[in-house]
Amino acid sequence: PVISSVAIDPAGKLLAAAGDDHLVRIFDSQSGSILSRWKSHTDWVKTSAFRPDGQVLATSGADRRIRLWDMTGQNRPRDLSEQPQVIYTLAYSPDGRMLATAGFDDKVRILETDQGRLLRELAAPGSDIRAICFSPDGTRLAAAGRAGLVRIWEADAGRPVADVQVLAPMHKGVAGVANLNAALQAALNPRHPGLKTVSGEFRPGDKLIQLRNNYDKDLFNGDIGQVLSIDGVKGTLT
């Protein structure tokens, strides 16, 4: 069979492999022997992931079903509600409370793992999403796909962190650029010490837009970048 997904349990003892024959195979990761063959999907199994405690394996794919397999053997496998599109990738949050899914359409869906309830639906960076993951501390969720873009959200709130652009008709006032920049920075990037200048405070992770052409540096009006680091001693940023 074509194997399109592999996953290793947190203890490193079991390996799950699945693919185009609709089967999920469980191997002993040390000996390589097959322990189980499970068939419940009706189409290509595209993705699999162990819950962080290793007690549940989630699988999904072209049949749009998410099946949760009880690795303790005490309960029958159960299905979450059928998803709107083919699923290419899924990932558990580090605490196991949330399961993020994405695939052929332009949405990232976050499900509650006990009942499969949809917690939130996020606008993905284009359609055909192929990769998704949580940060180790569970505060961030990232997704990417065929469009070649990566989008990062605050996992609990669903707010985009690294893909935000707001247009304003003026520089001053409540709805002006200066005030909106400060408000967005406080909401989306509040955790880093910054570099204070006459134009405002800059922090690592902030997005910037070039306002004037600079032909010597090959920079043009409208170019967008991001602050990577700050040197407080020299008063410079990269």
Image (spheres, rainbow, N blue to C red):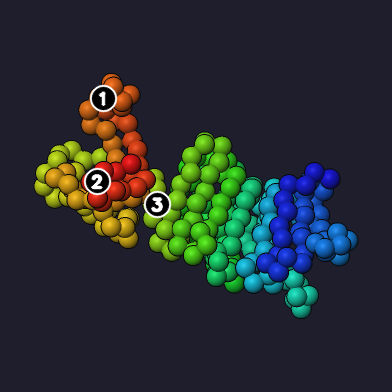
Distance (Cα) linking label 1 and label 2: 22 Å
Q: Tell me which label, 2 or 3, sits earlier in the chain.
A: 3
Q: Residue at x 31, y 25 (%)?
A: 217
| Badge 3 density bin: few <14, some 14–19, many ≥20, Cα 10 Å | some
Residue 234's disc number? 2
- Number of numbered discs: 3
Marks 1/2 in contact by CB < 8 Å: the verdict is: no
Q: Residues within 10 Å of mark 1 (few under 14, many from 20)?
A: few
Q: Nearer the viewer, mark 2 or mark 3?
A: 2
Residue displayed at 66% across by 59% down: 49
Residue 68 visible here: no
**Residue 88 versus residue 229: which sits nearer the camera?**
229
- Which residue: 82% across, 63% down? 30
* 97 vs 30, nearest the viewer: 30
Q: In which quadrant will I find the N terminus?
A: top right
The residue that disc 3 covers is 160
Residue 238 on image: x %, y %:
33, 41
Secondary structure type for disc 2: loop
Q: Which residue is mark 1?
A: 214
Q: Position of residue 225 (x, y in %)?
A: 35, 38
Q: Residue furthest front?
A: 233
Amino acid, disc 2:
Lys
Q: Left or right of 175: which side holds 98? A: right
Image point (14%, 50%), residue name: 174
**Would residue 46 be seen by someone viewing this image from the given angle?**
yes
Q: Amino acid at mark 3?
A: Pro
Q: Which callout, 1 or 2, points to the residue nearer the camera?
A: 2
Look at discs 3 and 1 and give the one toward the viewer: 1
Q: Disc 3 to disc 1, how far (Cα)? A: 30 Å
